[in-house]
Image (tube, rainbow, N blue to C red):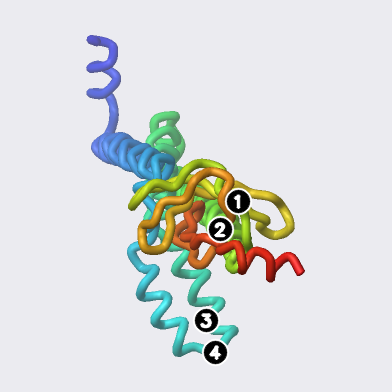
Amino acid sequence: MEALNAWWAGLTTLNHGFYIAALFFSAFFLWQLIMAVIGLGAGDTVLDSAADHSWEHDSPADAHDTMFVFKLLSIRSLIAFATLFSWAGALYIDHGIPVSTALTYALIWGLAAMVVVSLLMHLLRRMTETGNMQIDSCLGSTGSVHLDIPVEGMGEIRVACSGVMTHFRARTAGGKPLKAGAEARVVKVLGPNIVEVVAVSPIEGKDNSK
């Protein structure tokens, strides 16, 4: 503990600021990461809605550039920039690198972190959009109830989606129960893995089989 106190006392005021900022932004970045993993950080940008409105009034080329800028300035990418910038500045100065050079290196590390996080978030968003497109393709398809769908509850349906038999959580329109093995048609997408279905009557089933 004494060695730590001596090390801290030997640092400059500027380096104190860098280390404090590094610890603060590291904790903030870790919190954001945990929120994203457990699904509570879906709204990753504070500027997304503003970007969407501005995009509607721009030309396609301008809109693309605008969306790229807003994605680059997302909350997580800015936190990543601040985290690596702070740590790099603190460590470079701590190792005797001149302040101007240390700040330049720290800026490069921060910008690299911002770009990497922005690209990762873009890829995750594309993966989510692809998943939504796939589930949309099963609208109107008929499948079989895999797990009982109770009254006002959730069950499971097995249905062809993009040519592949897939299982989705399902509830029935109107809250009517459906037993496992019953035929049902997908009428609405409620979420990334949740659909709303209606029972297929015997007459309707015969007509679909012709």
- Chain-order first, disc 4 or disc 2: 4
- Chain-order first, disc 1 or disc 4: 4
**Structural distance between the alpha carbons of marks 1 and 2:** 6 Å
**Residue depicted at x 47% and y 43%:** 148
Mark 2 lies on a secondary structure that is: strand
**Residue depicted at x 28% and y 16%:** 4
Please state which amino acid type lies under the numbered disc 1: Ser
> Closer to the camera, 12 or 163?
163
- Chain-order first, disc 2 or disc 3: 3
Find disc 1 in the rendering and name its residue: 144
**Structural distance between the alpha carbons of marks 1 and 4:** 46 Å
Q: Find residue 184 and name its label.
A: 2
- Chain-order first, disc 1 or disc 3: 3
Can residue 188 be seen at all in this image of the molecule? yes
Instruction: Please give left or right for residue 148 compared with residue 11 in the image.
Output: right
Examine the rendered structure and indicate whether residue 154 appears above or below residue 4: below
Which quadrant does the C terminus fall into? Answer: bottom right
Mark 1 lies on a secondary structure that is: strand
Please state which amino acid type lies under the numbered disc 3: Ala
